[in-house]
Amino acid sequence: MTSAVPNNSPRSTLEALREVRLFKDLPGEDLTAFASYFELAAVPMGHQVYKHGDPSDALYVVRRGSIALYRDQMGKPIQLLARVSRGEVFGELGLFDGFERNASARANETSHLLRIGKHDLMAFLANQPDLTIKLQIAAARRHSMNVSMTLDLSQRKDVRIRLEKEVSLELEAGTQWQAQIQNLSLGGLCLRGAPDEWQKHWTVRFHLRFQDEGLHVSGRVTWRRDDTLGIAFSRTDPHHEDQIQRLLRLLLDD
């Protein structure tokens, strides 16, 4: 989700591109021509720039803010691939082979991005063999880093599994609350639709129930964004890990 940024100008776009290592060696006239293809847009915190499976239709430059690149598929570990900040490029994977996006991109904070469509980029690169090679090397490097991150993830015990399943929360006051569990790991969970009073740094205790399986949760809210929040588990009993594994199996088999 993006929106136009007010007071944008060709000069500000040109200055932003000069900060990008990949583009700094372009001659002045070429850089000015290149800048004319870009559009500037704002992405609110927490909103996606694109998601896994979307067409690889554009290249992006971060002008302000930061972007998280990650893989997030139903029933699989959530895998953070990279954090991209000011003066860095992303979205280059897939531009040269016509494939779909193999990862998602989300704004860690309200971010300003420069975007150039694939058609315009390829038209400009037709007369820029050196820049083409640089972008292809950058794409190959990104792919290599993603593979390394995948191998590292396979060695980790505590990974978040995307779920998006409706669950029941039994609160301390004895009331029932319906919510959606977004993901779960040995270290914590993410809920959508939790009570409004559960804000960052709050200590929470409740019993999470799904079908015939339950999990006693005691922890602290580490972040909240709109109706979604993350909870880090506090110290738990020796059987807590077994309870999580049983609940995960039930959620994934449903």
Image (tube, rainbow, N blue to C red):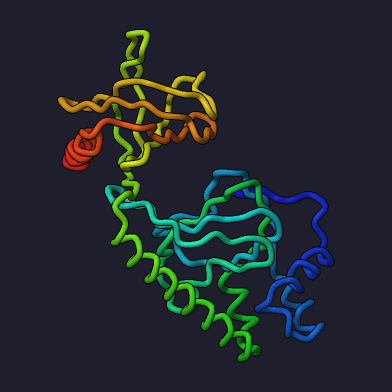
Q: How many marks?
A: 0
| Residue at 35% across, 64% down | 152
Specify whether residue 254 is in view: no
State left or right for residue 38 relative to residue 155.
right
State left or right for residue 127 relative to residue 70.
right
| Foreground pick, 149 / 15 | 149
| Residue at 16% across, 41% down | 253
| Foreground pick, 189 / 142 | 189
- Residue 75: horizontal and vertical position, in percent? 27, 48
In the image, residue 167 sits, relative to residue 176, either above or below, namely: below
| Foreground pick, 252 / 10 | 252
| The quarter of the displayed image where residue 185 is located | top left
Quarter of the image with the C terminus in it? top left
In the image, residue 190 sits, relative to residue 71, either above or below, namely: above
- Residue 153: horizontal and vertical position, in percent? 34, 60
Specify whether residue 233 is in view: yes
- Residue 23: horizontal and vertical position, in percent? 69, 79
| Residue at 52% across, 55% down | 68
In the image, residue 222 sits, relative to residue 145, either above or below, namely: above
- Residue 173: horizontal and vertical position, in percent? 37, 8
| Residue at 50% across, 20% down | 196
